[in-house]
């Protein structure tokens, strides 16, 4: 359980997330993920990083139960900062990051894959931001990198999800494969990237980031301010307390 790093092939680092039951990461988990990604990218032998997960889905966002246990704002501040660091670690990783997505990719998961360089998804993968249903805001910055502007807004306001096939049609998912083939497909793309010169691929990553039209760190940080405002106003707690009521009843 936690975040682990392995080397499945020459020049490839596989960072795997495993926080049962649904990969809803606690505060420390986001920091662990950020550290693993940065460490993998700094390794001079690494030319591509694959970000994957075990379990039922790729990522379910922050640990809502951890939020509920905190009577103050410590968990919220920790989650905000942890997500910020993890998302930035994907984007700023010195080499390309390929996200291997299965099952649900929600909330913070969108922040991770939206900042990745390429996405390979299983046929059962779904992507969405149920933030308004959870008393939160954020990661519209990253969803906007996956779908066109008006679709992003509609998905955000309704908390609906998009399928891997739909994202593939928009060009943001590289390949959609059967779930049993997901890991091998992601590693195959990583292996192709890893054939490039290590120094040159790092220059390419820095160059491509440098021409991005949106500063993803600043944009996401702006969103986080509204998340904190929602919490200070009390509306976030009111909405968050109703999250999952149907499952509990």
Image (spheres, rainbow, N blue to C red):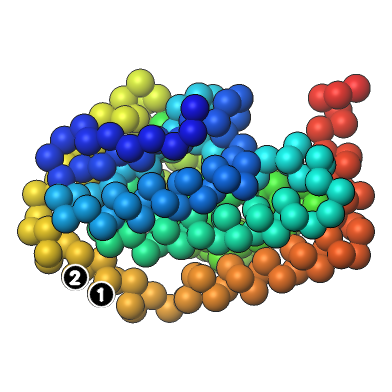
On the image, the x and y values in percent for residue 25 come to: 59, 40
Horizontal side of residue 188 vs 156, given as left or right:
left
Quadrant hosting residue 197:
bottom left
Q: How many residues crowd around disc 2 within 10 Å: few (fewer than 14), some, or many (20 or more)?
A: few
| Residue at image point 21% right, 43% down | 12
Mark 1 — residue? 207
On the image, the x and y values in percent for residue 227 come to: 75, 63
Residue 84 in view in this figure: yes
Marker count (numbered): 2
138 relative to 61, above or below: below
Residue 147 in view in this figure: no
Horizontal side of residue 247 vs 12, given as left or right:
right
Residue 173 or residue 139, whichever sits in front: 139
Q: SS for tag 2?
A: helix
Marking on residue 232: none
Mark 2 — residue? 203
Residues at marks 1 and 2, CA–CA distance in whole angstroms: 6 Å
| Residue at image point 15% right, 45% down | 11
Quadrant hosting residue 249:
top right
Mark 1 vs 2: CB contact within 8 A: yes
| Residue at image point 26% right, 42% down | 13
| Residue at image point 81% right, 46% down | 70
Q: SS for tag 1?
A: helix
Q: How many residues crowd around disc 1 within 10 Å: few (fewer than 14), some, or many (20 or more)?
A: few
On the image, the x and y values in percent for residue 69 come to: 81, 40
Residue 21 or residue 99, whichever sits in front: 21
On the image, the x and y values in percent for residue 120 come to: 35, 41
């Amino acid at each position: 359980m936690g975040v682990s790093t392995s080397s499945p092939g020459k020049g490839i680092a596989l960072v795997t997330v495993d926080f049962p039951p649904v990969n809803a990461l606690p505060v420390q988990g986001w920091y662990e993920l950020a550290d693993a990604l940065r460490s993998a990218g700094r390794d001079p032998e690494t030319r591509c990083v694959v970000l994957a997960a075990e379990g039922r889905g790729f990522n379910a966002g922050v640990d809502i139960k951890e939020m509920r246990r905190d009577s103050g704002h410590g968990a919220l501040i920790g989650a905000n900062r942890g997500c910020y660091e993890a998302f930035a670690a994907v984007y700023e990783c010195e080499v390309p990051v390929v996200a291997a997505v299965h099952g649900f990719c929600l909330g913070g998961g969108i922040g991770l894959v939206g900042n990745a360089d390429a996405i390979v998804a299983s046929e059962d993968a779904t992507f969405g931001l149920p933030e308004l249903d959870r008393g939160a805001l954020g990661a519209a910055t990253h969803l906007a990198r996956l779908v066109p502007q008006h679709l992003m807004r509609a998905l955000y306001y309704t908390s609906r999800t998009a399928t891997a096939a739909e994202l593939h049609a928009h060009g943001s998912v590289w390949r959609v494969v059967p779930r049993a083939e997901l890991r091998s497909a992601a590693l195959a793309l990583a292996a192709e990237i890893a054939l490039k010169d290590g120094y040159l691929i790092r220059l390419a990553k820095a160059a491509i980031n440098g021409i991005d039209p949106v500063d993803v760190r600043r944009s996401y940080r702006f969103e986080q301010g509204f998340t904190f405002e929602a919490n200070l106003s009390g509306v976030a707690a009111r909405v968050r307390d109703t999250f999952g009521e149907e499952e509990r009843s």
